[in-house]
Image: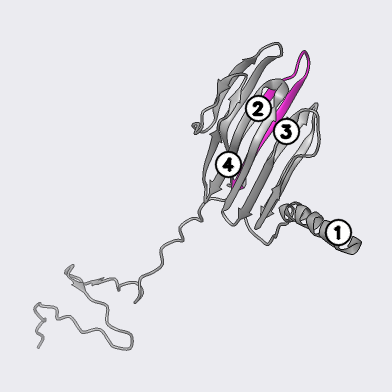
Amino acid sequence: MRLTRLSAAAAIAGALAAPLAMAGTASATTGTGSAYGLAATGLVAIPATPAVAATADKSLLHLPANPLIDVKVLHVTAKPAYARASVTDLSVAKAALTAHLVTATCDNGTARSHLAKASLAGHRLAADAAPNSALTIPVQGLGTASVTLNKQVRNADGTLTVTAIEAVLPLGPGHTQTLSVSSATCAGPAENPPPTQPPGGPKPTPTPTATGSPVPTPPPGQAPKPTPVTGDLPVTG
């Protein structure tokens, strides 16, 4: 009986641990896309988490424990010319920033972002904001927050980066928190190749005669046809 109970307990523990193990898996090969779920600097510093590049897919069920930022699920994926990042149940309670879903997608040089049920200090944030929509919002008792929605930047190497939310949040006198949520980078479409010479090669250029009338260039190996010249011959004797 005791052995049976221990076996059952082990099976339950394995079932609970399985989702956590699956959340951290990722594969990577060569590619051009990259993405991350969240990054922060200030009172709470968080490196780009989770982050992928080339061809990979990664999920995280929860941010590392910290006193300021709470996120339930982060998922990022990347492959050649494509990247996507999503964050669910974002909360920065002290700055009154919340969002049910934050996504950023970069696909073959075209970028977009989307917010679901997002608000800052009681102000609803646009679900599908125009690129680089900047706004300032007062946070009662703390100061003024600066926010850019659907931030899009063309990088020096020609890639495009879209960040759904980039915010500088006030946390009281002399204290701010910078937050970047859902960021994706991808390469644009390849340039069109130069036009090629049509089959058969270039057409021969006509050779002008003394009278100005064009005569077609003969095929290789064949002498040109003589052109008669009219006129009087001098008579001697």
**Residue drawn 17% across the image and 70% down it:** 213
| CA distance for labels 2 and 1 | 52 Å
**Earlier-in-chain disc, 1 versus 4:** 1
Q: Decide if residue 206 is on the left or right side of residue 155.
A: left
Disc 2 designates what residue? 167
**Earlier-in-chain disc, 2 versus 1:** 1
Magenta-highlighted residues: 167-186
- Mark 2 vs mark 3, foreground winner is 3
- Mark 3 vs mark 1, foreground winner is 1
Q: Is residue 69 above or below residue 3?
A: above
Disc 4 designates what residue? 104
| CA distance for labels 2 and 3 | 15 Å
**Earlier-in-chain disc, 2 versus 4:** 4
**Residue drawn 77% across the image and 13% down it:** 173
Disc 3 designates what residue? 70
- Mark 1 vs mark 4, foreground winner is 1
Answer whether labels 2 and 3 touch (C-beta < 8 Å): no
Q: Secondary structure at mark 4?
A: strand
Residue 179 colored in magenta in the image: yes
> Is any atom of residue 211 visible in this view?
yes
Name which residue type carries label 4: Ala
Looking at the rendering, in which quadrant would you find the C terminus?
Answer: bottom left
**Callout 2 environment at 10 Å: few (<14), some (14 to 19), or many (20+)?**
many
| CA distance for labels 3 and 1 | 37 Å
Q: Secondary structure at mark 3?
A: strand
Name which residue type carries label 1: Arg
| CA distance for labels 2 and 4 | 15 Å
Name which residue type carries label 2: Ala
**Is 187 or 214 nearer to us in this picture?**
187
Q: Quadrant of residue 40?
A: top right
